[in-house]
Image (tube, grey):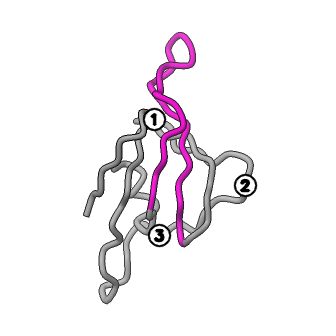
Amino acid sequence: MEFRTVWANVERIRFTEEGGKPGLGASWRANAVATIEGRDYEVIIGPHALAVLHTDPPPKTPTLPPTASPVALTLTYSDGSTEVVE
């Protein structure tokens, strides 16, 4: 949900690994693919990390326009299970 505070228009997040701490003192994080406005972005998501890898950053939309309907967010976890967050 932290990711949505920066990119309210994210449509799908597919975690590509279970996640974990990459080193001593590092916070938990996981690699994922985020779909924003129909385009995929490789990202790192964690409580203190929101990074975009290998691509230009997606268009930031911290809030949707008042006339826009909320975007349903589909989460696909590394084990293949899915969940939709409205």
| 30 lies above or below 69 | above
Marks 1 & 2, CB-CB < 8 Å contact = no
Label 3 Cα neighbours within 10 Å, binned few <14 / some 14-19 / many ≥20? some
The residue lying at 50 percent from left, 14 percent from top is 25
Marks 3 & 2, CB-CB < 8 Å contact = no
Q: Earlier in the sequence, mark 3 or mark 2?
A: 2
Label 1 Cα neighbours within 10 Å, binned few <14 / some 14-19 / many ≥20? some
Instruction: Estimate the x, y position of residue 71 in percent, counting from the top left.
Output: 35, 71
Q: Earlier in the sequence, mark 1 or mark 2?
A: 2
Disc 2 target residue: 55
Disc 1 target residue: 78
* Horizontal side, residue 6 vs residue 59: left or right: left
| 19 lies above or below 14 | above
From the viewer's side, name the closer residue of 36 and 64: 36
Part of the protein shown in magenta: 12-37
The residue lying at 52 percent from left, 44 percent from top is 50
Residue 27 in magenta stretch = yes
Outermost top residue: 24
| 10 lies above or below 82 | below
| Disc 3/disc 1 C-alpha distance (Å) | 26 Å
Task: Look at label 2 and name its amino acid.
Answer: Thr
Task: Look at label 1 and name its amino acid.
Answer: Ser
| Disc 1/disc 2 C-alpha distance (Å) | 22 Å
Instruction: Estimate the x, y position of residue 35 in percent, counting from the top left.
Output: 53, 60
The residue lying at 33 percent from left, 50 percent from top is 1
Outermost front residue: 80
